[in-house]
Image (spheres, rainbow, N blue to C red):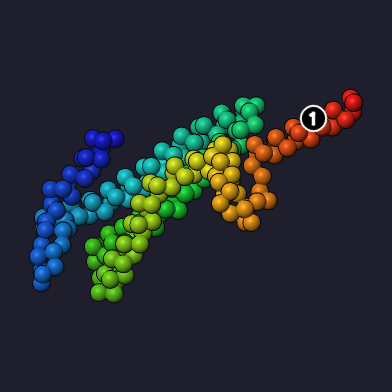
Amino acid sequence: MWTLSLGASLPTVIWAQVNNKSDLWTCKEEYPKGTKWKSFSYMELNILVLIIPLSVMLFCYSRIIPILMTMKSQKKHRAVRLMLVLVSVFFLFWTPYNIVIFLKFLQYLGYMHTCEWDQDLNMAMQWVETIAFCHCCINPIIYAFVGQRFRNLFLRILKEWFPLCFGRFRTTETYLFSIGVQLSCTHALQHG
């Protein structure tokens, strides 16, 4: 993966140029004129950032889910739900970025070649890049919220900090404890 990432970013590293225009410093790729490197970079982004990862995820999870469904564990549905959430979140966060990249590719080819499109795509790129890159931070949170122990600790903290808002929610641990106490009391009363 490191080799693939290094190889994919090499053209950008090679052709990155710092320019000073009217006291404004910019850094962007200056691909050689008459070559297909810029077109290649747009297609490379779409393929390496969305198509390949999504295909790998779908393939692997489509192989894992049938195996999980044959198991008798009660947690299999939670695992399947986690996989579906991970794929959905990946798709939702990275698709807008790849759509804007594709539109920039079309603009480079000569379609939508107006100042308005250029401004709109540059503004859209700032937004969708932020959304896409936030995805890297969200996966650990998804894994944490799916875990029951984390949810119980999180709810306990919320109850302590905001008792009026979250005081009525029960964690699984306190719920099981209260059932155990009730059963013990009932058992003690019945057997005297």
Q: Give the camera-side residue of 179 and 143.
A: 179
Q: Residue 128's image quarter?
A: bottom left
Q: Position of residue 88 (x, y in %)?
A: 49, 48
Q: Give the camera-side residue of 24 and 38.
A: 24
Q: Give the camera-side residue of 51 and 178.
A: 178
Query: In the figure, is residue 121 to the left or right of 157?
Result: left
Residue at 45% across, 53% down: 92
Q: Residue 71's image quarter?
A: top right
Q: Position of residue 163 (x, y in %)?
A: 62, 53
Q: Position of residue 13 (x, y in %)?
A: 16, 48
Query: In the figure, is residue 101 to the left or right of 64?
Result: left
Query: In the figure, is residue 180 to the left or right of 152?
Result: right
Q: Amino acid at mark 1?
A: Ser
**Which residue is disc 1 drawn over?**
184
CA neighbours of label 1 inside 10 A, class few (<14), some (14 to 19), many (20+):
few
* Count of marks, rendered view: 1
As displayed, is residue 158 above or below residue 146?
Answer: below
Label 1: which secondary element: helix
Residue at 29% across, 74% down: 116
Q: Could one spot residue 55 in this view of the protein?
A: yes
Residue at 79% across, 35% down: 182
Image quadrant where one finds the N terminus: top left
Q: Residue 5's image quarter?
A: top left
Image quadrant where one finds the C terminus: top right
Query: In the figure, is residue 129 to the left or right of 169?
Result: left
